[in-house]
Amino acid sequence: MGLLLALVGAYGVFLVYTGVVFGWQGVGLGPAVSGEAPRRRARDWLAQAGLEEVRTGEFFAVTVALVVLSAGLAFALFGGVLPALVAATFAATLPVTSYRSRRQRRRAEAREAWPRMIEEIRIQTGSLGRSIPQALFEVGRGGPEELRPAFAAAEREWRLSTDFARTVAVLKDRLADASADATLETLLVAHEVGGSNLDGRLAALIEDRLQDLHGRKDARAKQAGVRFARWFVLVVPLGMTLAGLSIGTGRHAYQTVTGQLAVATGLACVAGCWVWAGRLMRLPEEERVFHG
């Protein structure tokens, strides 16, 4: 008890000292981290999936519904609480996985579209003599379907305010993409400062985007067999489980204590291997710039 009181007192002195000298807040060992960064990452994540209008409460409601449905289905199949809990835990990750897949697909489409769009902006501002905002919006109207709403919102902002900096901020917030950040900042500087080197800067940016795109395509091509094996490992145990339920006393065996533990262990192993394989195959993502 004396040692415990001494530790609590020493920690209290530490909190008072760091609060007075460094201005730290909270009861942690370091300064309290603002919640703005996680919220911004969540907004970027949803925007990259094309779900910027989805609220956190709606996302949570979908997750809860899937958890309840999966738990009920697992309980009906195996007749036990433990497999139902494992299935519910795995189902809780499905909305995140689904949104992540949608996000990856949209980002892949954006990566393929941006070199062409930058080249069109380069032609519009160079050979055709269009202004930078006009060229940007014309290219956006002909861009991928998923990106057009962001360009439409930015064009409305431009018509209302004629402030290109605010327009770029709206477009960057809607797109939440590293290529868009670099391109739009280049256009913003050229629009505000001027200069005759915009064509060269856009050409260098196109080359950089093409190299990144080709590198990612090569990496994903090499992962094709591993991705198929990942789905194979997920589907085969489920098929064996359903077959076991229909043979002899298989359903009764699943309801015993040993059967419940075996099912729970198997589900946990499948889920763990699925997540682990996904992390191993994840390609590094570009960090956004100029998005404060």
Image (cartoon, grey):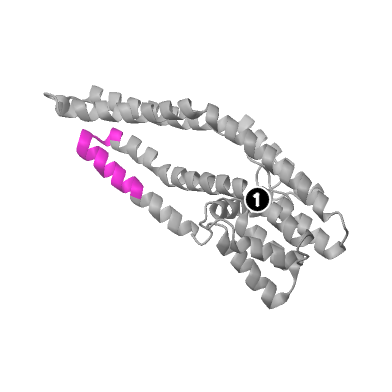
Question: Residue 87 is drawn in which quadrant?
Answer: top left
Q: Is 70 inside the magenta-drawn segment?
A: yes
Q: Is 104 inside the magenta-drawn segment?
A: no
Instruction: Out of 174 and 125, give the one closest to the viewer.
Output: 125
Q: Position of residue 232 (x, y in %)?
A: 37, 27
Q: Position of residue 34 (x, y in %)?
A: 66, 52
Instruction: Out of 249 and 241, give the one closest to the viewer.
Output: 241
Kindly report the secondary structure that dominates the magenta region of the rendered protein: helix
Quadrant in which the N terminus appears: top right
| Rendered view: 120 above or below 29 | below
Instruction: Out of 107 and 80, give the one closest to the viewer.
Output: 107
Type of the residue with mark 1? Arg
Q: Secondary structure at mark 1?
A: helix
Quadrant in which the C terminus appears: bottom right
Q: Position of residue 271 (x, y in %)?
A: 40, 31
Residue at 82%, 59% in the rendered image: 189
Total count of labels = 1
User: On the rendered structure, is 192 left or right of 244?
Assistant: right
In magenta, the rendered stretch is: 66-83
